[in-house]
């Protein structure tokens, strides 16, 4: 390893990078972050440079307690992984990891290691790092970490990065030789386990994308191959991910809407740009029916609740309308006090012959931002199809271990 990339907590992460085993520096940084965030409900808050608008959602009561006291080293937790096709299951793992301590540092495994141990990644390391950094529960990212968590590497995490606990999901993580990847931190009592999120995985999303690619290539799928999403969206999950603040009546609300299917760096980029334009980013996630009508029968790859959770996990999104109207309405603009409507030029389309953004344009609220990344669902599906044999082999292997996990899975309490 490795570079530590600052997420929102620039000064704090910098100190992690230079070896904040001396936790008091971290405590002070965290306390500064807290006071800048000005939480309104006595809970959490992130420094976002937005005049105290909080994204809410993270559950770090211990952080507030530790940092406010200023006398105790914040608990630094570390989670590593591939985070390929970053999904709301990964985000939920990071949310739970953050709740195990005060500061969350995430290690992102490099491309060569993933290829060697799991098969080819869909997204390269730069993109995977960008996606992890965009997650609102992440304080810092270490890139280029090994897949095999050796004792030496773990000691380096403890000594150089001030890590107190290593965290992983309750699914077994075995090294190629069949031994437990986290045996060392477990043995010395510095390991914490969180609940793996059911019904979603990179393997599952990759399978869905393969089906999109095959359909686009003119293949007919067998009925048995068409799988419904199995994730159960509960109200508590939405609450855990969601904002604890309502849309401000006196702030500048920026509205962005779209499918946000297979959440990617292009989505993060437009949300980040939206955030720069105002105080509060409200995201409209279109219904499955609207996305299907616009993009074709194989879309969306993720249903609207899954897509909404991914958006909610992003640090630049403050609130989400789940199942927003594709055509902007007067009521939507008024109800949510929208000052600016942001779209990429590619988002311009008609429904029943009418421009979906017509009202925003007529009211002078419309801003077009440039698309920074060419990321699209079709593009990812094409990339997978170009290396189809490798991805299918990867999925067949992973599907086996996932089935074994589900076959023996027990109820695990969520952090
Ligand atoms: N994780 C989780 N729930 C999921 C998927 C992943 O809690 N549905 C957790 C894993 O347990 C791990 C972290 O997210 O602690 C990173 O996982 P990663 O290394 O990216 O890969 P996998 O565990 O193989 O998961 P996936 O196939 O979805 O990438």
Image (cartoon, rainbow, N blue to C red):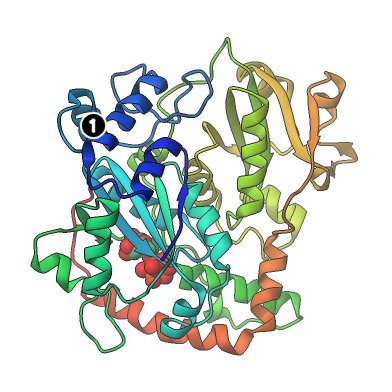
Residue furthest out toward the right? 353
The residue at 47%/73% (across/down) is 203
Q: Quadrant of residue 29?
A: top left
Residue 246 rendering spot, x and y as whole percentages? 48, 21
Say if 258 sits above or below 242 in the image: below
Q: Quadrant of residue 173?
A: bottom left
Say if 230 sits above or below 22 in the image: below
Q: Nearer the viewer, residue 410 or 243?
A: 243
- Asked whether, in this view, residue 105 is left or right of residue 130, the answer is left
Residue furthest out toward the top? 250
Residue 81 rendering spot, x and y as whole percentages? 38, 65
Within-10-Å neighbours for mark 1: few <14, some 14–19, many 20+: some
The residue at 35%/62% (across/down) is 80
Residue 391 rendering spot, x and y as whole percentages? 56, 83
Residue 375 rendering spot, x and y as whole percentages? 69, 59
Q: Using the rendered image of the protein, determine whether residue 389 is visible from the camera's viewpoint.
A: yes
The residue at 21%/83% (across/down) is 179
Say if 322 sits above or below 338 in the image: below
Quadrant housing the N terminus: bottom left
Say if 146 sits above or below 164 in the image: below
Ligand 1 image-quadrant field: bottom left
Q: Is mark 1 within 8 Å of ligand 1?
A: no
Residue on which the image places disc 1: 61
């Amino acid at each position: 390893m490795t570079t530590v990339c600052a997420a929102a907590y620039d000064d704090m992460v910098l100190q992690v990078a230079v070896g904040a085993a001396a936790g008091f520096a971290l405590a002070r940084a965290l306390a500064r972050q807290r006071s800048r965030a000005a939480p309104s409900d006595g809970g959490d808050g992130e420094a976002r440079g937005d005049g105290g608008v909080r994204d809410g959602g993270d559950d770090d009561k211990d952080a507030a307690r530790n940092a406010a006291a200023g006398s105790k080293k914040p608990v630094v937790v570390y989670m590593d992984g591939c985070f390929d096709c970053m999904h709301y299951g990964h985000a939920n793992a990071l949310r739970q990891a953050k709740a195990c301590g005060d500061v969350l540092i995430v290690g992102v495994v490099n491309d060569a290691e993933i290829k060697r141990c799991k098969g080819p990644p869909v997204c390269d390391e730069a993109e995977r790092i960008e996606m992890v950094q965009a997650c609102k529960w992440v304080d810092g990212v270490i890139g280029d970490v090994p897949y095999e968590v050796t004792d030496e590497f773990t000691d380096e995490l403890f000594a150089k990065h001030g890590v107190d606990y290593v965290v992983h999901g309750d699914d077994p993580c075995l090294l190629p030789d069949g031994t437990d990847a986290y045996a060392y931190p477990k043995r010395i009592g510095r390991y914490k386990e969180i609940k793996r999120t059911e019904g979603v995985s990179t393997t599952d999303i990759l399978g869905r994308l393969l089906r999109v690619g095959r359909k686009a290539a003119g293949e007919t799928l067998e009925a048995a191959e068409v799988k419904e999403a199995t994730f159960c969206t509960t109200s508590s999950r939405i609450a855990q991910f969601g904002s604890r603040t309502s849309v401000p009546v006196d702030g500048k609300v920026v509205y962005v809407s779209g499918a946000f299917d297979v959440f990617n760096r292009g989505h993060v980029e437009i949300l980040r740009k939206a955030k720069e334009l105002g105080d509060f980013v409200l995201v409209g996630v279109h219904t499955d029916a609207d996305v299907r009508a616009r993009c074709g029968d194989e879309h969306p790859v993720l249903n609207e609740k899954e897509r909404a959770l991914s958006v909610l996990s992003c640090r630049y999104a403050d609130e989400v309308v789940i199942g927003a109207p594709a055509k902007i309405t007067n009521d939507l603009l008024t109800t949510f006090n929208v000052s600016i409507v942001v779209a990429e030029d590619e988002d311009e389309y008609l429904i029943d012959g009418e421009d979906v953004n017509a009202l925003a344009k007529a009211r002078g609220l419309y801003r077009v931002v440039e698309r920074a990344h060419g990321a699209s669902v079709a593009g990812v599906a094409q990339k997978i199809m170009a290396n189809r044999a490798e991805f299918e082999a990867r999925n067949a292997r992973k599907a086996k271990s996932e089935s074994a996990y589900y076959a023996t899975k027990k109820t695990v309490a969520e952090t």
